[in-house]
Image: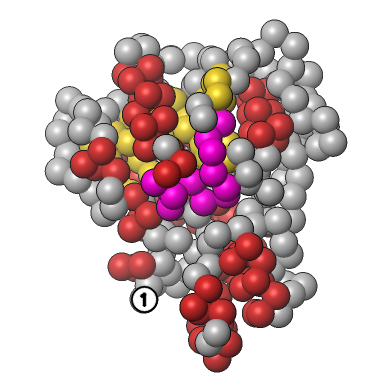
Amino acid sequence: MTATLTADRTLLVCLHHAGGTAAAFRHWPGALPDVDVHAVELPGHGARAVEPVGRDLATVLDRLDTELGPLLDSRHHVVFGHSMGGLLGYHLLMRRAARGARVAAALLVAGYGAPHLARPSAAGIDPDSVDDETLARHLHRMGGFPAELMRRPEWLPMLLGTVRADLRVCAGHRWTGGTPALSVPVHAFAGEHDPLATVPVMRAWSAHTDAGFALTVLPGGHFLVQDPAAGLLPAVATALATALTTAPPTASPTGPPTGLPTASAATAPTGARPHRRTL
């Protein structure tokens, strides 16, 4: 799902949540007229439903890197990821930095906590330890599964197959101490009532960049991307305006993040830029 591309404009690459599709960003091109929006459709999702879904994190990243690499190498770009998309965006930029590829102008992430804070999956539940009804109820409580589908249990195996596969992909993430920080700015967006990616764990992204950090807290839950009232799109537009007026960094990562908070005390390191609250 891509708006008409113009070579001299910034490209905004959007990565969807677990079980989602590129349609999550269908309203973004009209609301963000100063950039070209490229909403990624992962294999096995949406218009690519006939393709095999990725079964592990490395496989999904290999495919993303191969498909997006030429485009990112040729364009000034920003990467936005929601929930699982935030995890994928982080790993994609780390891979590209490791081989000296063109650097993004910024990483924007919503609904996924800082990489060093371990979690079983992007949904906060082990996809292999619960039945379909339990998983559906959990997703419904977070706002990611329609109530009407809860009344059709016979549909759940089909509807939740892709979700489970995506959650297994996310469960493959492991943080390794000493991993270098990104050399691009990071702007995190936290839902004030998100039970999974809470404000403290979103603020902890500050430890993973050497190029500036900001946090916007919005009046919503986990699925900010599906809640127009939360104000995510205007907040993203503001973050993009900053990225577009800042020269893209050229330095490669140097050394590991320092002062990493623990999962029980996920706060920005001393001296980190204070977060910005939008209510």
Q: Can residue 74 be seen here?
A: no
Q: Quadrant of residue 212?
A: top right
- The stretch of residues the image draws in magenta is 217-228
Q: Amino acid at mark 1?
A: Val
Is 75 placed left or right of 62 in the picture? left
Query: In this rendering, is residue 110 above or below 268?
Result: below
Q: Quadrant of residue 192?
A: top right
Is 255 placed left or right of 23 in the picture? right
Q: Nearer the viewer, residue 176 or 134?
A: 134
Q: Residue 198: where, in percent of width, then height?
A: 68, 40
Tally of numbered tags = 1
What residue lies at 56% left-to-right and 79% top-to-bottom? 150
Q: Nearer the viewer, residue 210 or 62?
A: 210
Q: Residue 29: where, in percent of width, then height?
A: 24, 42
Q: Can residue 272 be seen here?
A: yes
What residue lies at 38% left-to-right and 20% top-to-bottom? 243
Is 203 placed left or right of 157 in the picture? right
Q: Residue 1: where, in percent of width, then height?
A: 26, 54
Element class at badge 1? loop
Q: Residue 40: where, in percent of width, then height?
A: 36, 51
Query: In this rendering, is residue 216 above or below 119?
Result: above
Is residue 159 highlighted in magenta? no
Query: In this rendering, is residue 141 above or below 247?
Result: below
Q: Nearer the viewer, residue 275 or 186?
A: 275
Q: Nearer the viewer, residue 125 or 128?
A: 125
What residue lies at 64% left-to-right and 57% top-to-bottom? 123
Mark 1: few/some/many CA within 10 Å (<14, 14-19, 20+):
few
Residue at which label 1 appears = 50
